[in-house]
Image (cartoon, rainbow, N blue to C red):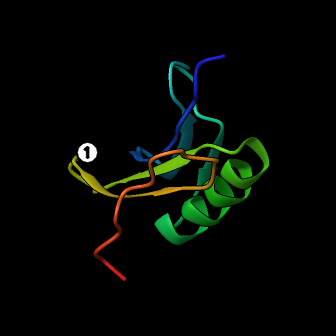
Amino acid sequence: MKKKDIHVVPHKDGWATKKEGVSRAGSLHNTQKDAISRAKDQAIREKSEVVIHRKDGRIRDSDSYGNDPFPPKDRKH
């Protein structure tokens, strides 16, 4: 089964969570903080990764909540 990352992306009404490979938003939120919280909860359940985007669409950050056999060395914390 292919891993489905969860992206936090800008949306016309604020922010949205969107699963990789799916065209529709999973949930809509007024703030990026709320969208990140929702995406994190879902990623923990599904053992996947959260990819957070900036307003311009570029990737800002990502966090893994799965069983990664080769975890990256996180230098941001």
Q: Residue furthest bottom?
A: 77
Q: Position of residue 53 (x, y in %)?
A: 33, 52
Q: Tell me the quarter of the picture where residue 29 sits.
A: bottom right
Q: Tell me the quarter of the picture where residue 62 sits.
A: bottom left
Q: Tell me the quarter of the picture where residue 22 sits.
A: top right
* Image quarter in which the C terminus is found: bottom left
Give, as a three-letter code, the residue at label 1: Gly
Q: Residue furthest right?
A: 45
Q: Position of residue 48 (x, y in %)?
A: 61, 43
Q: Position of residue 46 (x, y in %)?
A: 74, 41
According to the picture, the residue beneath numbered tag 1 turns out to be 57
* Image quarter in which the N terminus is found: top right
Q: Is residue 63 left or right of residue 77?
A: right
Q: Position of residue 11 (x, y in %)?
A: 43, 44
Q: Is residue 77 above or below residue 5?
A: below
Q: Is residue 31 above or below residue 72?
A: below
